[in-house]
Image (tube, rainbow, N blue to C red):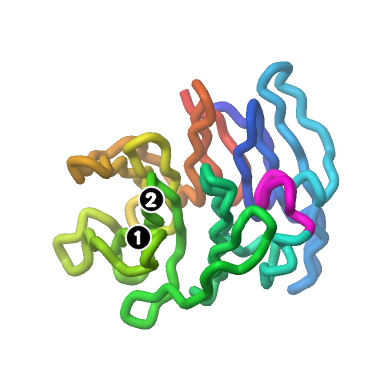
Amino acid sequence: MKTVFEGNILDVVSVENGLVIAYALQQDGEEIMVAYKMVTFDNGMITNVQKSMYELSKFGANYKQVVKHAKSHLSCKAVILPNGKIFILEKDGSAKLLDGNANEIWSGNLQYRGEAPSGIAINNRSVWSCFKAKSVLMRMNLVTMREELRIGGGTSSPFSQPIDLFAIDDDIYVCNAGTNIVLKVNTTSYVTEEYKTFDRDVLQFIKNGKYEFAVLENGVYLLD
């Protein structure tokens, strides 16, 4: 692994030809001063950016209106759909689906046996969510907003405390806190395989073009 940026990482958003990193610049108890960096792949430069760049990258062109629907612009999960709609998930499991003008289409609560999702990803017309304590991966239809499929759970689950998801093409990459392993799940065949192994918790896994990144608590790393 090659170090891209070291710091107390709060969130990383993948953008065209780069990454936007939110990190704790200073922390005094529960008070955190947040700062933002942008990594540009073309020249490898890391530059300071404003919160607005992070929100634009995370919530899309209409971010000023979309962010009003979020309880926290940092802790919420947000996925921009190909049709311009935006799915927002909060840490408590409350969720919203917005249209391109930031109008609410649907709101509800995503839970599995009383637990809120630890991560989400959009794949085709489905939203996938993982549940850390239950070691479960779940698929929900974006039209009906109903559960369609559940993978894992119990002692035979292929997942171990999954904490985040990243989807691209027909694959979903699952970060497992219990084993420090990123698993790749094919959403067509449902074949699950080990993809990357780490010596500590991997908070996020990101593929951007030809690059792959692991987000750990102490930094962002480019994978070999």
Q: Which label is found at residue 125? A: 2
Image vertical order of residue 212 relative to residue 164, above or below: above
| Outermost top residue | 43
- How would you rate the neighbour count of disc 2 (Cα within 10 Å): few for under 14, some for 14-19, many for 20 or more? few
Sequence order check, earlier mark of 2 and 1: 2
Q: Residue at x 69, y 40 (%)?
A: 20
Whether the magenta-drawn stretch holds residue 100 is answered as no
- The answer to whether 184 appears left or right of 46 in the picture is left
Q: Which residue is mark 1?
A: 141
131 up-or-down from 167: above or below: below
Residue 76: percent from left, percent from top: 60, 63
Instruction: For residue 54, say whether it is visible.
Output: yes
Question: Circle 1: is it few (<14), some (14-19), or many (20+) Cα within 10 Å?
Answer: some
What type is the residue that disc 2 sits on?
A: Arg
Label 1 sits on a secondary structure element that is strand
Q: Residue at x 71, y 50 (%)?
A: 22
Disc 2 and disc 1 in contact, CB within 8 angstroms? yes
| Residue 62, magenta (yes or no) | yes
- Percent x, y for residue 224? 46, 23
Give the dominant element type of the magenta stretch: helix, strand or loop.
Answer: helix
What is the three-letter code of the residue carrying label 1?
Asn
Q: Position of residue 88 (x, y in %)?
A: 57, 62
Residue bounds of the magenta highlight:
55-64
The image shows residue 164, relative to residue 16, as above or below, that is below
Residue at point 50%, 21% (across, down): 210
Q: In this view of the protein, which residue sits in the foreground, 154 or 167?
A: 167
**Percent of width and height locating residue 119:** 46, 59
Question: Label 2's element?
Answer: loop
